[in-house]
Image (cartoon, grey):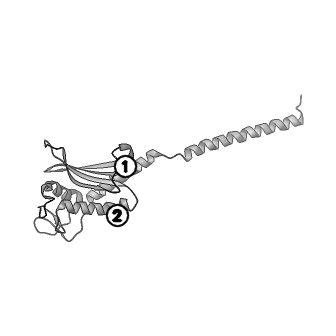
Amino acid sequence: MSLNPNKKAQMEMIGIVVIVILITLGMLFMAQFAFKEDKTKKVFTAQGLAASTLGALFKTTVINTDCVSEFGAAALPQIGEELLEDCALNYETKDDPGGYSSYTCGGIHTCKFLKGSVTSLLGDTLGTWGKKYQFSAKLLIPGGKTNFIDLIDIKNKGGCPKTQGDRDCSQQPLSTEAGQVLAELCIC
């Protein structure tokens, strides 16, 4: 039994239409996943940026001919090791006009110098890239009346929201004789 040539042509057309529909559905399915925004990749990138920026900030050496150590010698201190530790050790005198600190850069207290330097460094990098950020350094005093003392607080464009989903943070601890310093950089 043979099929009528018209029916055979109709069957072939239906087969082609079915194949075209299946291919179209497959392409739409692939396009949906190809153009879908991957939020985990953005979160990882922002967390990596916060961590690497904070790490680089801690390792940055201040090359300022006006930086002098307490011994009167010119110094090239690192922000993380020497200057932040000095700020923590001498935080009580940071608001006094002639307040003591082991390092004086430009004739000012270490804490004030750090705030200006970190503001400038973050502004030149994250600020230039259009990132909203917040940097803080807090001194955690064990057994004190307050849990922490604010050493430095820098907010770009109003800072970051408190909710963790809207920001990515990196923290860097530093042990000092005054207590534990916790530096945190959040990018949002």
Q: Residues within 10 Å of mark 1 (few under 14, many from 20)?
A: many
Query: Residue placed farthest to the front in the image?
Result: 158
- Tell whether 56 sits left or right of 7: left
Q: Amino acid at mark 2?
A: Asp
Foreground: 60 or 139?
139
Badge nearest the viewer, 2 or 1: 2
**Residue named by callout 1:** 47
Question: Which of the 4 quarters of the picture holds residue 79?
Answer: bottom left
Query: Residue placed farthest to the top in the image?
Result: 1
Residue at point 46% right, 45% down? 39
- 84 vs 142: above or below: below
- Tell whether 112 sits left or right of 22: left
Q: Amino acid at mark 1?
A: Gln
Q: Quadrant of the N terminus?
A: top right
Q: Position of residue 184 (x, y in %)?
A: 28, 50
Q: Position of residue 70 (x, y in %)?
A: 11, 64
Q: Position of residue 3 (x, y in %)?
A: 88, 32
**Residue named by callout 2:** 124
- Tell whether 72 sits left or right of 148: left
Residue at point 27% right, 60% down? 118
Confirm or deny contact between disc 2 and disc 1 (CB under 8 A). no
- 106 vs 31: above or below: below
